Image (cartoon, grey):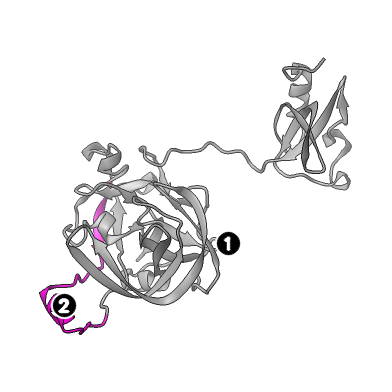
Amino acid sequence: MAWTSVPRTFETRIFRQRNVVGVGIAKKVVDGRQTKEPCIVVFVERKLPKSELERKDLIPIRIETMKTDVVETGRIVALQARTVRVRPAPGGVSIGHFRITAGTLGVVVPRSGVRVILSNNHVLANSNDGRRGDAILQPGSYDGGTTADQIASLEDFVRIVFDGFLDRLLGLFGIVRPARNVVDAAVARPLRDADVSNDILEIGPVSGTTSATLDMPVRKSGRTTGLTQGRVTAIAATVRVSYGLTRVARFRDQIVVTALSQGGDSGSLVVDSGNRAVGLLFAGSSNTTILNPIASVASQLGLQF
């Protein structure tokens, strides 16, 4: 008869063994296929060959009448909600200027020896309408953030040049002026250094920067869609981006990737497989995501990755 729980004596013993992170009742997997045979499954952080294990750390083939199975899970960590207040706040969680809804905290990075929060102008500076010293909330107001949740003050931003009357007039004659924007970026200074973390949720710390190349695999951690992956489909792109119903801005030298974001993911830092920063996510559509090159962001805001 199959067991419905793991014997307590075995459970106590198994957790003394190196690498074990869990134990339970499951169906045995053979050659990648699940069988109907019940077993005791032992979850390990990393599956090692027997030659690398001490005898005391070997999982027995059978516990009384039940066979065992060993499954590699990696380190098991508590999953954090991205739209709640988090202290210290990592990259990938909700944040925003007190007058906007919510975007994503990209990463905490040094600037002239001081750690600052990096995200988009339209997230931290209310699309040019913010002023230095304005309250930055974590979580953003859309996610319930109030003045009691202020985590930082707006420190600096790169102004977005929106198309104006002259651009629209010239457009009637088929004349298009060169795009004048390169980044949608801003930084905020934490009220307390201990309130922010250098890590990005589900990614970890950033390891420098790199330039995008075609077909490069990338990933991001954002407020709305969490950890997602994609690949670079175009570089050196010029794009026309709508801000709300009436304002439009054109950006040059942008990175285009497969869709890995939705509204609220703006401000996410996009990294490569080695956790090197590639770009700052700021716009997208149903099948495309647009990034500012990280070198441009760092240069214009004086950041040291």
Relative height, residue 255 to residue 26 (above, below) = below
Relative height, residue 118 to residue 60 (above, below) = below
Q: x and y percent of residue 257 in the render?
A: 46, 65
Left or right: residue 231 versus residue 31 is left
Q: Which dot, 1 or 2, sits closer to the camera?
A: 2
Q: x and y percent of residue 85 in the render?
A: 35, 38
CB-based contact (under 8 Å), mark 1 and mark 2: no
Q: Say which residue label 1 marks.
A: 273
Snapshot quadrant of residue 116: bottom left
Magenta region, residue range:
151-178
Snapshot quadrant of residue 216: bottom right
Magenta highlight on residue 62: no
Question: What residue sits 37% from the left and 67% below the top?
Answer: 303
Relative height, residue 277 to residue 43 (above, below) = below
Question: What residue sits 50% from the left and 59% below the top?
Answer: 206
Magenta highlight on residue 162: yes
Q: Say which residue label 2 marks.
A: 167
